[in-house]
Amino acid sequence: MELGQAVAYLEEIVAGLKSGRLCLENEGEELLLSPQRQVKVLVEARHKKDKESVGIKLTWHVPMPQKAPIPALRISSKSGTDGH
């Protein structure tokens, strides 16, 4: 991959982070991520004899959806339709 193409990928990731919606697609499979306000960033750099690399990892916690409240328990010897 040419450096310019790698830069374009990174710019798309940055745009997704800014918008709060990051969509990745590979071979027909799509993954939609929702970056949050608090992000953990890990950056690693390596230099070997004839090779250099930079690794960037971003993680965040996704809020869990609110569960519907459980109806209050009602115990009675009469049914709700008895009228008593």
Image (tube, rainbow, N blue to C red):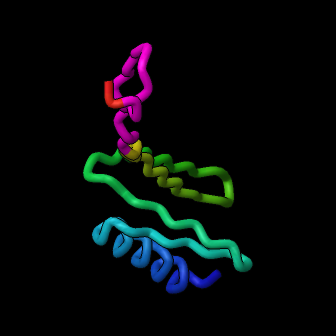
- The residue depicted at 64 percent of the width and 50 percent of the height is 48
Quadrant location of residue 19?
bottom left
Q: x and y percent of residue 4 in the render?
A: 50, 85
Q: What are the residue bounds of the magenta stretch?
A: 66-82
Q: Is residue 39 left or right of residue 4?
A: left
Quadrant housing the N terminus? bottom right
When the figure is inspected, residue 24 is found, relative to residue 45, above or below; the finding is below
Q: Name which quarter of the figure residue 80 lies in.
A: top left
Q: As displayed, is residue 43 above or below residue 11?
A: above
Find out whether residue 56 is within the magenta segment: no
Q: Position of residue 40 (x, y in %)?
A: 37, 43
> Residue 81 versus residue 73: which sits nearer the camera?
81
- Residue at 37%, 57% in the rendered image: 35
How many marks are shown on the rendered structure? Answer: 0
Residue 79 on the magenta span: yes
Q: Is residue 75 visible?
A: yes
Q: Residue at x 40, y 40 (%)?
A: 67
Where in the figure is residue 57, as x and y percent of width and height? 48, 50
Q: Is residue 35 above or below residue 42?
A: below
Side (left or right) of 67 relative to 57: left
Q: Give the residue at x 28% y 69%.
A: 18
* Residue in front for this viewpoint, 15 or 41: 15
Residue 47 % position (x, y): 57, 51
17 above or below 76? below
User: Which residue is at the front of the view, 58 or 55?
Assistant: 58
- Check the picture and name the quadrant holding the C terminus: top left
* Residue 61 seen anywhere in this rendered image of the structure: no
